[in-house]
Structures are given as C-alpha cells and as structure tokens.
C-alpha cells in the first residue's frame, strides 16, 4: 500500500449527506482522505481541479451542474479517476443517459 492516501472529493447538495459520509466512513482505514466537499457540481469541479482527487463521490441531481456532467468533465480531464454516483432516483435510466 502506498504511503500517500487516496484523495476523495464528496459532492452533494444535501449537507447532511456530505457530513454523514465524512463522519461515518473510517477513511484512514482504507488509506483515504476526504480533501474537499462541495454543495453543487460547479464547486465540485473547482475543487476537483484544485485537489486532483483519485475518487469523486457525487450526487446525480445537484444545482449549477449535475453529477453526470461533473463525471463527464472529470473523466475527460483524468480518465483514471474513479467516480461513484449517488442517487435517490427510482428510475436508474436517468443515470445511464449520455
């Protein structure tokens, strides 16, 4: 395992979700550290450019830029970055659109 922790960015417009993820996951156990959290896609994109995380956890539906657009930008800029999409949508086809 590398000495440098894996950098994680969390993006969700619900502050309780962001705080919950940061507080309930034992990030250090997995050699990870949350470097930033963002309340919308635009701020998440700015944080991504600043911190260059290896993992982005994002809600799909957010103001200013949705998680799908954020994921597209992240993958264009850094193809090896892993993106995890969170959603409360019943219809998963929403997340599968291009």
Image (tube, helix red, strand yellow):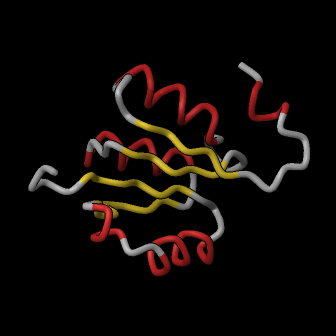
Q: Quadrant of the C terminus?
A: top right
Instruction: Give the residue at x 65% y 68%.
Output: 14
Instruction: Give the residue at x 16% y 51%.
Output: 1
Nearest the viewer among 24 and 78 is 24
Nearest the viewer among 65 and 30 is 30
Vertical placement of 18 versus 94: above or below? below
- Image quadrant where residue 9 sits: bottom left
In the visual, does 10 lie left or right of 15? left
x%, y% of residue 94? 82, 34
The single residue placed furthest to the left in the displayed view is 3
Nearest the viewer among 69 and 83 is 83
x%, y% of residue 8? 36, 54
- The image shows a total of numbered marks equal to 0
Vertical placement of 70 versus 14: above or below? above
Instruction: Give the residue at x 75% y 27%.
Output: 96
x%, y% of residue 10? 47, 58
The single residue placed furthest to the front in the displayed view is 1
Instruction: Give the residue at x 25% y 61%.
Output: 31
In the visual, does 62 lie left or right of 90? left
In the visual, does 59 lie left or right of 54? right
x%, y% of residue 86? 66, 51
Nearest the viewer among 26 and 83 is 26
């Amino acid at each position: 395992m590398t000495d440098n922790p894996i950098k994680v960015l969390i993006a969700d417009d619900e502050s309780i979700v962001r705080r919950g993820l940061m507080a309930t996951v034992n990030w250090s156990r997995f050699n990870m550290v949350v470097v930033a959290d963002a309340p919308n896609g635009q701020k998440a994109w700015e944080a991504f450019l600043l911190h260059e995380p290896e993992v982005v956890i994002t809600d799909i539906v957010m103001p200013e830029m949705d998680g799908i657009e954020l994921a597209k930008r992240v993958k264009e800029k850094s193809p090896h970055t892993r993106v995890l999409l969170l959603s409360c949508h019943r219809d998963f086809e929403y997340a599968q659109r291009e």
